[in-house]
């Protein structure tokens, strides 16, 4: 076989290209989502929707840094009805992943009940990891809360569902979370969300660079790639093989994506680098990944997916 294919499947969806925007980047409005769909992206993820529209945290709430970004957006979004309406009234010929993020489990359940009743049968991503809602801890760090949420959701939800997880830093955390998730017919996990509650300081003004939460916010970009690689690898080693993995964190080149896939990612999402470069980034990432595969003699992503070797000297 001489042809290179970079397509991948998650649930019933085929991504002809393995790159998609991370929830929260270029996806709050219909215009932005159309820009993603009109690029070389494999599909689009919506901004994490809440039941009602939200304006989010006060500004400045996002800053680029040399090695990445910090954000405390606070889930600004147009509300679930807006995104459902966008999906239902447009001819979208690429996979669309409807991200939702309640500010409580009760809201998540109400949103999923609405989606269950709707005509939308595509991928839905339950965000368990937003670090930026004032006064609300990340559910993904409360294992009893994850277990309760999964039990409640899968008592009625029958459509393809993924969860967006925060980064974990201890092997026992991977064991505990995988043990819970393996009990359910989850379609995928998305790992990692930003590294929560970092702080970026401007030495000139002697102040934090963003305003909400005293400057604490989610860190993304090059800083977080080793953490994303570890989370993808650790979950791939523990999750049932039929639970797919979206790898997110620190991707700005085709080589970054190659490494995430080598660790076990099925497709890859792009956040900070998309924010910095715009949707043209997807064509560049496609061609960099394809060229690397040609150089290495690979024909499809499954030739190297999950095949990271231990270093044995
Ligand atoms: C935000 O809107 O604050 C970012 C979303 C997230 O980190 O999940």
Image (spheres, grey):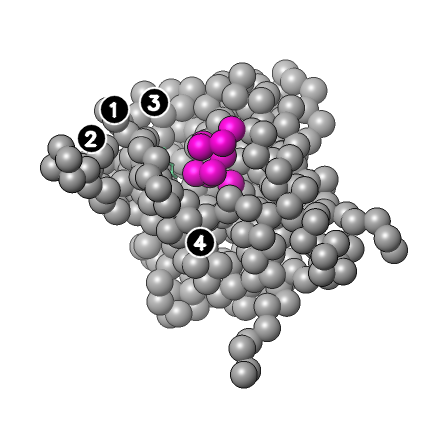
Mark 4 or mark 2: name the one nearer the start of the chain. 2
Q: Nearer the viewer, residue 177 or 110?
A: 177
Residue tagged 3: 54
Looking at the rendering, the quadrant in which ligand 1 lies is: top left
Q: CA distance from mark 3 to mark 2?
A: 18 Å
Q: How many marks?
A: 4
Frontmost of labels 4 and 2 is 4
| Residue lying at 56% horizontally and 58% vertically, measured from the top left | 259
Residue 201, given in percent of the width and then of the height, sits at 19, 41
Frontmost of labels 3 and 2 is 2
| Residue lying at 52% horizontally and 21% vertically, measured from the top left | 32
On residue 211, the disc is: 2
Q: Quadrant of the C terminus?
A: bottom right
Q: CA distance from mark 4 to mark 3?
A: 30 Å
Frontmost of labels 4 and 1 is 4
Q: CB under 8 Å between callouts 1 and 2? A: yes
Tell me where the magenta segment starts and ends, as one range.
270-278
Lateral position of residue 250 relative to residue 242, left or right:
left
Tell me if residue 44 comes above or below residue 305 in the rendering: above
Q: CB under 8 Å between callouts 4 and 1? A: no
Residue 104 showing in the rendered view: no
On residue 225, the disc is: 4
- Mark 3 CB near ligand 1 (8 Å cut): no
Q: Quadrant of residue 70?
A: top left
Mark 4 or mark 1: name the one nearer the start of the chain. 1
Secondary structure of the residue carrying tag 2 is loop
Q: CB under 8 Å between callouts 3 and 2? A: no
Q: Quadrant of residue 282?
A: top right
Residue tagged 1: 59
């Amino acid at each position: 076989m001489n042809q290179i294919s970079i397509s991948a499947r998650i649930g019933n969806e085929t991504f002809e290209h393995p790159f998609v925007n991370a929830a929260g980047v270029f996806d709050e409005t219909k215009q932005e989502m159309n820009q993603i769909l009109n690029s070389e992206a494999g599909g689009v993820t919506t901004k994490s929707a809440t039941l009602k529209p939200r304006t989010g945290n006060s500004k400045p709430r996002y800053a680029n840094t040399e090695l990445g970004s910090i954000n405390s957006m606070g889930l600004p979004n147009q509300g679930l009805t807006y995104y459902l309406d966008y999906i239902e009234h447009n001819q979208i010929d690429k996979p669309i992943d409807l991200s939702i993020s309640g500010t409580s489990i009760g809201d998540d359940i109400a949103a999923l009940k609405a989606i269950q009743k709707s005509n939308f049968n595509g991928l839905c991503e339950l965000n368990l990891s937003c670090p930026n809602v004032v006064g609300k801890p990340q559910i993904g760090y409360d294992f009893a809360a994850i277990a309760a949420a999964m039990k409640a959701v899968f008592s009625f939800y029958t459509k393809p569902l993924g969860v967006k997880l925060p980064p974990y830093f201890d092997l026992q955390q991977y064991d505990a979370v995988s043990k819970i998730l393996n009990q359910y017919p989850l379609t995928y996990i998305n790992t990692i969300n930003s590294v929560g509650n970092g702080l970026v300081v401007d030495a000139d003004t002697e102040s934090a660079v963003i305003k909400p939460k005293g400057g604490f916010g989610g860190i993304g970009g090059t800083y977080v790639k080793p953490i994303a690689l570890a989370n993808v690898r650790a979950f791939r080693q523990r999750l049932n093989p039929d639970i797919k993995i979206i790898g997110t964190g620190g991707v700005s080149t085709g080589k970054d994506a190659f490494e995430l896939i080598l660790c076990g990612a099925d497709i890859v999402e792009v956040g900070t680098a998309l924010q910095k470069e715009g949707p043209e980034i997807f064509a560049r990432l496609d061609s960099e990944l394809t060229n690397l595969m040609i150089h290495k003699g690979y024909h499809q992503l499954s030739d190297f997916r999950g095949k990271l070797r231990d270093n044995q000297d």
